[in-house]
Amino acid sequence: MENVLTPPAGSPVDFAWLIPVVPALSAGLLLVFGKRLGRLSSAVAILSIGFSATLSTMVFAFLQAQPEEGRVFVRTLGTWLSVGGADGLRVDWALLIDPLASVMLLLVTWVGLLIHVYSLGYMAHDERNPQFFAYLNLFAASMLILVTGSSFLTLFVGWELVGLCSYLLVGFWFERRDYATAAKKAFVVNRIGDVGFMIAMFLIFATFGSLTFADVLPAVSTAATGVLIAVGLLLFVGATGKSAQIPLFVWLPDAMAGPTPVSALIHAATMVTAGVYLVARASPLYLEIPDVGLLVAWVGAATAFVAAAIACAQVDLKRILAYSTVSQLGYMFIGVGVGDYTAGVFHLLTHGFFKALLFLAAGSVMHAVADETDIRRMGGLFSKMPVTAVTSLIAVLAIAGFPYTSGFFSKEEVLASAAARPGAQGIWVLGILVAGMTAFYMARWFVLIFLGSPRWAEGVRPHESPPSMTLPLVVLAVGSAAGGLLNTSPEDGFLHHWLEPSVAAFAADGHFLSEGLLLGAALGVAAVGGLLGALLYLRVDVATVGVGGGARNAARRRYYVDEVYETIVMRPGRAMADAFAAFDRRGIDGAVNGLARMTAGVATVGRRTQTGFVRSYALAVLAGTVLIAALFASGVVFGGIR
Amino acid sequence: MIVPAGHYLVLAAALFTVGVVGVLVRRNLIVMFMCIELMLNSVNLTLVTFSRVNGNLDGQVLSFFVMVVAAAEVTVGLALIVNLFRLKASADADDVDALRS
C-alpha cells in the first residue's frame, strides 16, 4: 500500500471505472425501458456484465504485466466530498485497483456473468424478467463498487448498495408474504452490522484524518492500540452483518427466498464475501491487533460449527446450501482471523465457484421437479439430469475437500494456518470437525437428491435443464475442480505471491503438528464424514429423515436462534413501538385534536354574533363608537378632552 | 343678527342623530343610504361651523373632501343597491344575509 501509482493513460486500469459503471447504466436502462425491450433486456444485461468481465480480465492481465512493486493503482475520477478545508474530510470517487481488487473483480464479473446466463433459462417464464435482470446488473455493479472502492467510504457505498439489491432480489417475489419478510429481515440485520461499520469509520477519521486506504493503512502502527482494537471490532461487527456470522447470520438462510440465481449471486460472488474482503482489505490494521484477529477466528469457527450442525438436519435443498455458506464463511473468517489473509481470500474464491455451482444446480433440480425443495421428495435424479448431477458431484467433492479439487487446497490452507497460529489450536480442532460435518451433509444432500429410489410426486416429469442453464454449470464445475491451481501451496502458490502487495503476509509460527498429520487428519475426518453421509442416506428409510427429537430436532429448528431473537429483540421492540404508537395517538394526536376541538367550541359560541343583519352590525359599530367616545371624554384614554 | 355657533352644532347633532336612528331602524336600503348622507352632511355642518369659529379655512376645505367622497360613495352604493335589487327583487337590508352563520 506504500507504493500507489496513477494508471498510465489508455491502459485498462485507466478505464477500470467502466467496470461498475456499465452494469449500473444497463440496470438503469432496463428499469426505465425494460417493458419496451422485453426479451432483449436479458441480452443487454448479459452484454453489460460480459463487458465488465472482459475489462476485468484485461485489468488482471495488465497488472500481471507490471513489475511486482508497481501493481497498486488508484484511478481518481473526481472529488466527492471536500469538507473543512485542507485537513478536513476529503473523499474522492476513486478506484483502487490492486491484486486483491483484481481477483475480486474477476470472481464477481465472471461468476456474475455465468449467473446472468443461467437466469436466461431460469427466469424465462417470469413476467418481470427485465426488472430481474436490472436488479442482477445493479447487484453486480454494487459489488464491483465495493471491491474497487479506494476508501472506507466508497467501499461503504457499495456495501449499502448490495444491501439494497439483496432486499430487492430476495423479495423479488414479494407477492408471497414470507418472502417479503425474508427480504426485510436481510435488510434490517444488515443495517445492524452497518452501524458498526459506520462508527468504525468515524473513529478512523478521528484518528487518521482520512478515510482513504492509502492514507490509513500504512499509518495504523502510529495509532493507539485501544483505538485500533475498537476499529477492528467495529469493522468486524459490520463484517458479521454482511457475511452472516454469529450473531447476525440469521438473515442468510432466509435470503434463499429469492429466485435461485439470486441465492447463487448472494452466496458466491456478491454480498456475503464483502465482510471477508473488508477484513482482508484492512489486514494491516488487524495485523496490529492479533488478539482481535483471534476473536474473529473464534467467531468464524463457532459459526462454521453451528451452521454445519444445522445444515446436517435440514431437508430443504436450498436451506442446506445456505447454512453451508454460513459455515464456509466461518472458514474464511478463520483464515483472515488467524492472520493468513491469502488463505481466507483463497477460500473465498474457490467457495465462489463451488457454491455458485451448487446453488445453480439446486435451481436446475427445482426446475426439473416442479419447484419442489424438499429433498425427501427427490432421489434418483442422476439418470434424469446427468449434467446437473455430475457437476453437482464435482461441487460436492470440492466443498468436502476431496484431494486436488479447489476446496481441498483452500480449506487445507485455512486449517494449516489455524494450526500454525499459537493459541488457535482449538479453532483448528473445530475446523477439522466442521470439515467432517461438511462432507457429511453434502453427501447427504447429493445422495438424497440424485441417488436412491425416485420419490418425486405423481405427475412430475424430471428433465435436464436447457443449455443456457447447464452451460454455466459446466463452466463452474471446471472452476470448482481446477480452482485449486491458483494456490497449490502456501510457499509457492500463485495467489500468495499475487496478493503480497495487497494484504499483510502470514507469519507462520511452526505447526503444533507435523504437516502430514494435519493433512491426514483433515482428509480422514472428511472421508469418514462423507462416507457416513453417503452410506447412511443411500439406503435410508425416507420416513426417518427430517424427524426425530433431541439434538436432531434442535438442529432442525435451527437451534431456536430465530425464536431467541424474536423473544429478546422483536418482542421488546414491538412493545416499544406499541408504546410509542399509543403515545403518538393519545399524546401528540390528542394535543393537536384537543386544540382543534377547543377552537371549534369557541367558534360555536362566537358564530352566534354573526347574524347577517346589516343593522345589527351598524348597532354594534354605534355602540363601539359611543363606548370609545365615552372613554375619550372621561379621560380614561388619551388623557381626555382638554 | 348673528346666529351663535352653538345653534349650528345643536342642529348638526340633531341631524346626525336622525341619521343614526334611521340607519338602525329602517330596513329599506335607499332610506338607510339617505340617512348615511344625512350623517355626512351634519358632519359637514360641524366642520364649517368650527371653521367659522376658528377663523380659518381648514374645516371648509375638509368639508369639500367629504362631499367628494360622499359623491363617489353614492355612485358605488346606488350601483350596489340596483344590482342587489335585480338579484333579490327587494331592497330590504334584512334579505341580504348570505353571510349569516
Image (spheres, coloured by chain):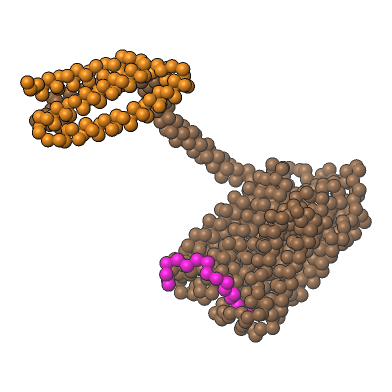
**Secondary structure of the magenta portion, mostly?**
strand
In the displayed structure image, the side of residue A500 where residue A259 appears, left or right: right
- Residue furthest toward the right? A383
Nearest the viewer among A289 and A522 is A289
**Residue A614 position within the rendered picture, expressed as x and y whole percent measured from the top left:** 36, 20
Query: Is A319 situated above or below B89?
Result: below
Q: Identify the residue at horizontal 82%, vertical 47% (top origin).
A: A372
Can residue A597 be spotted in the picture? yes
**Residue A230 position within the rendered picture, expressed as x and y whole percent measured from the top left:** 49, 63
**Residue A184 position within the rendered picture, expressed as x and y whole percent measured from the top left:** 63, 48
Tell me the quarter of the picture where residue A22 sits: bottom right
Q: Identify the residue at horizontal 67%, vertical 58% (top origin).
A: A28
Colour chain A is painted in: brown
Q: Which residues are magenta?
A: A71-87
Colour chain B is painted in: orange
**Is residue A73 within the magenta segment?**
yes
- Residue furthest toward the left? B1
Query: Is B48 situated above or below A453?
Result: above
Nearest the viewer among A249 and B62 is B62
Nearest the viewer among A576 and B43 is B43
Can residue A294 be spotted in the picture? no
Q: Quadrant of the N terminus of chain A?
A: bottom right
**Is residue B70 within the magenta segment?**
no
In the displayed structure image, the side of residue B4 where residue B18 appears, left or right: right
Query: Is A603 situated above or below A419?
Result: above
Nearest the viewer among B94 and A112 is B94
